[in-house]
Image (cartoon, grey):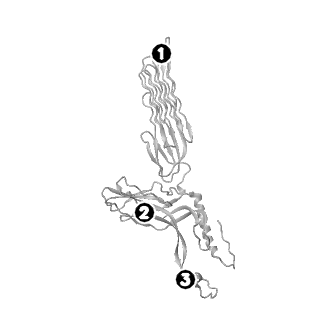
Amino acid sequence: MDRQIVYPGSVPLDTDLLNVQRNVMSALGYLAQVTLGTSTVVDGLACTATSPASMSISIGPGSITQFGVVDTAAFGSLEALSDPLLRLAVNLTSNQFTLAAPNVPGQSINYLVEASLVEADATPVVLPYYNSANPSQPYSGPGNSGAAQMTQRLQSVQLEVKAGAPGVTGSQQTPGVDAGWVGIYVIEVAYGDSAITAANINVYPTAPFLTWKLPQLTPGTHNLAVFGPTTQGGWQVPSGVTGVKVRIWGGGGAGGAGFTGPGGGGAGGGYCEGFYSVSPGELITITVGNGGAGSGQPGGTSSFGVLASATGGQAGADGTPSGTGAGGAAGGQGSGSGLSVNGSPGGPAFGLPANGSTPAAWMSGAGGGAFGSAGANSVVSTSGGSTIAGESGVSPGAGGSGGIEAGLGGSGGPGLVLVEW
């Protein structure tokens, strides 16, 4: 950090004091940039209902860091300085805002609370100046003009509440965030509301609140979301999260039916894993492929939005009348910017002849494995006419084995999506 040097007996300059303040602000700005980056970050500024409850909200003390320049205007006798700097503004007291409910039954209105860093000169004072002609009689203001001058440059968190257009409850829209501002809360007020409670207050989806403090941080990821065929759907990126690790398995293919011969094994689903950039509040669609059911059904595709996916394994072929065996099927494929692994093909079925052309023993095709899981085992008939169903593949993404005679093939194992952050 730059420092000013002064000497005993030298005449002090106003720039000595001004440069000390500018240097301290610059040093703190770069320290904040090292830890927070250059994006806007909000800390504190908690939005709460008043007590006793009313139609007002209270925004508590807090801070905002926002990228700008050192000084857009002259700072005393120092010229404006357009060097980039992450600046910090602090509110030490709370602010209250009063809202109104819509006056049409069945309607609601959304209010947006947005914040920005505002800098302004304040506290005008008529300052005494040195009068060289008569030192005992100071001048009043510069050149004895009596003019007041600003004595503080304040950086504060400016808060604003914007009302959206009233609409039928559930369809009302939140107003857009203004340029240079960030949205931090949405307050929903319905017709007939006479007081605002915590239930009316929601954090704006992309609000840049500082989610974790240093004592709360742990190395690596420590949160895990698990999605299967029954839990797939939209996943909203938590506040403060900008990167995730994703692991995806496609569904396993079903084994082939035996009919008059042994069926082939279903293939394993594909697999991929990687690290992906996301935005806080972003809604990402997650699909998870089912395993192929019964005979002849391939596994379904699993995906994490448009960023990564893994296809399901193909189904095993049904047995043939000659009982000479049915070939296995191709495995699924992973697709993404990280690691991609194909599922293993399903195994072929075999007929073991005795003295004639009729097999004395039949062995169905084994299921193909997926990354981290083995496929279902073959089933064996040691005498003609036996009906045996194939075994089902396990999750994630293993293929089912084929059946024998009238036995259906085993179902494939369902896919899986894991999201870590």
Q: From the viewer's perspective, is the residue at label 2 or at label 1 nearer?
A: 2
Query: Where is residue 257 drawn, in percent x and y?
Result: 44, 24
Residue type, numbered disc 3: Gly
Q: Nearer the viewer, residue 308 or 264?
A: 308
- Residue topped by disc 3: 146
- Residue topped by disc 1: 360
* Crowd tier of the residue under label 2, counting other residues whose Cα lies within 10 Å: few below 14, some 14–19, many 20 or above: some
Query: Where is residue 397 drawn, in percent x and y?
Result: 49, 34
- SS state under label 3: loop
Task: Farthest residue to the left: give it.
Answer: 105
- SS state under label 1: strand
* Crowd tier of the residue under label 3, counting other residues whose Cα lies within 10 Å: few below 14, some 14–19, many 20 or above: some
Q: From the viewer's perspective, is the residue at label 1 or at label 3 nearer?
A: 3
- SS state under label 2: strand
Q: Nearer the viewer, residue 100 or 1?
A: 100
> How far apart are the alpha carbons under marks 2 and 1?
82 Å
Q: Which callout, 1 or 3, points at the residue further toward the start of the chain?
A: 3
Please give the name of the residue rendered at 46% of the width and 37% of the height, measured from the top-left corner: 289
Residue type, numbered disc 1: Ala
Q: Are marks 2 and 1 in contact (CB under 8 Å)?
A: no
Q: Nearer the viewer, residue 381 or 93?
A: 93
Please give the name of the residue rendered at 48% of the width and 56% of the height, measured from the top-left corner: 207
- Residue topped by disc 2: 161
